[in-house]
Image (spheres, rainbow, N blue to C red):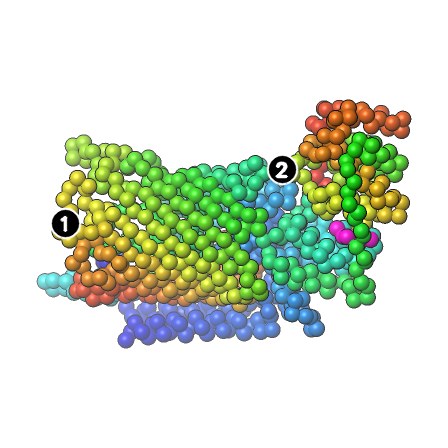
Amino acid sequence: MQIAFPSRMRGPQSRSAFLFVTGFLLLLVVLSATPGYAIPAFARKYGLPCSACHEAWPKLNSFGQNFKDNGYQLNNDRDSPIWLNPSYWPVAMRITPHWHYESVGRQLVDSGDGQVEQTIKTSGFDLTGIDLLAAGTLAKNVSFLLVPSFDAIDGTAGFESANIRIDNIKNSPWLNVKFGKFELDGPLSEKRMMTLSNNGGYYQLYHYVPFGGADINDFTVGENQLGIEVMGHSLDDHTRYSASLISSTNGELGLPSGRSYDGFVHISQAFMAGKLGLQRVGVYGVTGLRPTYFLTQDGEPIPGTGRGNKSFYRIGAYGNLYIGKFDLTGVYQHANDNVFLANGTPANGELPEGAQGAAWNTGTFEGHYLISPKHFILGRYELVRMSSQPVSDLPKDFGNIDVFTAGYRFYPFINSRAGFAWHIEFSTLNMVKTADSGADQRSNSFFTGFDFAF
Amino acid sequence: MMKSRTITCSLLLMAALAGLAFAQNAGISSGYPTPKNGFTDSQQRGHGLYLRYCVLCHGVYGDGNGDNAQFLDPRPRDFTAATFKCRSTPTGTLPLDSDLIHTLIRGIQATNMPSWRPLSDENRQDLVAYIKTFSDRWKTEKPGDPIKVPPEPAVTIDSIKHGHELFEKMECWKCHGQLGHGDGPSASTLTDSKDQPIRPYNFAAARNDSRFKCGVTNEDLYRIFMTGVDGTPMPSFADVIQPNDAWDLVHYLRTLQIGRRSKENDVLKSAGGASTLKTPETKSENITPADSDRQVSHAGH
């Protein structure tokens, strides 16, 4: 994997900036760590502190999950917008100004007549993309979520989420429908993840693609998808199910390039384990088809004419365990891409020698320790292990990945009008034998900044 | 070499910062001030939960003056008075823990108090333990003995008619209105124990999924007017009404919920409808199907 960086910062400069920023933050922590009660009201609507729904913002707790599963309703007669002050505007924004340091190992750089491998390091102040979050009820049991998202680099806008949901159909929590663009109901929410760095800010579980065979399957569980979801839950949310039928565009707007839909299902059951707290186990799976070639016009593919559909699937099981203030989620997933997808070969073409279907297994272990509502420690280890390379002569461990991420979030005040956290995180990722020389590639990310929403 | 130094520095710095921030809150169990000494483990845990879920409405001191209280109608409960609406115990007495836990599970209809069903049983027990620290009444008094709810007799037109007579005789209509709209002649003058305006329950607005503030079943309704709703003008009728009479009143009140499917409404309809209930004392209002299209009031006792 070769990653190009626009500039390099020399070692001493990098260290100086690092020390300056951390020193400043140290001072800030010293000055600001005081308990606080601020303006109340859950999103100016329900009068609940943010900690009512969030274990630590943005991670939901069981009450917040239940609220979400009810279609952003508490079912206390105050859900309908008729109860709202006319000036209420259900909009929030989230952005994270930050400083980050990146180190990417064994990148090819020009040197003399040829190229050599070199670690590239860089750092600087930065912004995440800006999320505009609008969510609420249109009427009792009719709710919406609209998330226009702005790219911090080029300012382009898109819709990360745009869906309408109808809840408690036939007065039953077991039948709710969501329609539009939404996050799949996976075992770990990537939209509410507690890690933000380049390496740790996404799940390999959802995004890993095999390196060896030019895989053309664009599906990722982590991207918000276009489609319809039917979900239901028990009153206490201990039993949950969801089933989604989604366009085969991986969330991109417009009609699919092929003529197929993807399907996703998820079933989970939670139970109380004495004083340990709520435990949850579940299984999920997704399957779909992707075209491998198109009809053409003057040699150019004609949109919507995908042919030679080939299949893929992801299946997984997980446990979400609470032991008091500590929680651990472990996810195992098996993934498979058809041989034509894995090798980027048209189904009416000839496969390369040694081509085979790609399969891999992913393990994700994410732990959180909530010292208090103000102090949150997180750690995650992810591993990807190829079980079948797209091409048989590749080393068995080619493209295997290990990622370790650790971080800490500090919430100096807690109220319902705004979310604010100082975030610090380190993540290191190792990819086996992916360098041009066949050596492992390691990249490190250090991230610190202020994550806020209001 | 440089790489490992950077990693080591980063990890050490993170640990140092976390330790420093944590150290500043030494003695703070949940990110908030430590409660008074002498708290039990359950009360201590309840304190953290209270601050997580309840404090912005009910206030740091449990007096119902949280930051958010000014926006709420009705106002949040004042735990320092230890006066609770929903009880199984006689009026004026403290409720059982189970009464408070049921309130947490159920939420309170027509208020901002949501259902806390997703919390664990232990969480709710801890919250109740902590809430009880706000008033010394819990140290000096014991909860009352729960009132006994006899088995419900069969719903008959006679029991409904008798309930209607009791409704007139006990002047329930003065607050709740002849048709149960919550618009009786006294309705606009009612205040709660904090001198806040309060509206009587609107029976007529009920739909199939409607609940009372203190429950949903006939047994809950029976209990409501036998225990009264403390802190509101709704008195207890335990001393003035016999159990069978109380059940008759329950059956009649259910017929005021004309938008709700019920056995009582079926019996009344079979007997000829609401006109069957007319008595000389009944005021001039007539009960007609058009009454189902009525103004919705969301508040009550």
> Would you place residue A441 above or below residue A136 in this image?
below
In the image, residue A198 lies at what x, y percent?
A: 35, 59
Query: Is residue B86 shown left or right of residue B14?
Result: right
| Crowd around label 1: few <14 · some 14–19 · many ≥20 (10 Å) | some
Q: CA distance from mark 2 to mark 1?
A: 63 Å
- Checking the image for residue A82, the label placed there is 2
User: In what quadrant of the picture does the N terminus of chain B appear?
Assistant: bottom left
A287, A441: nearer the viewer = A287
Dot 1: chain letter: A
| Nearest-to-viewer mark from 2 and 1 | 1
In the image, residue B159 lies at what x, y percent?
A: 82, 35
- The amino acid type found where label 2 is placed reads Ile
| Crowd around label 2: few <14 · some 14–19 · many ≥20 (10 Å) | few
Q: Residue at x 83, y 32 (%)?
A: B158
> What main secondary structure does the magenta stretch of the protein show?
loop
Residue A445 visible in the picture? no
Could you confirm whether marks 2 and 1 are on the same chain? yes
Residue A303 picture quarter: top left
Residue A342 visible in the picture? yes
Query: Is residue A361 shown left or right of residue B260?
Result: left
The residues colored magenta run B86-90
Dot 2: chain letter: A
Residue A276 picture quarter: bottom right
**Sequence-wise first label, 2 or 1:** 2
Instruction: Report which residue position mark 1 lands on.
Output: A352
- The amino acid type found where label 1 is placed reads Pro
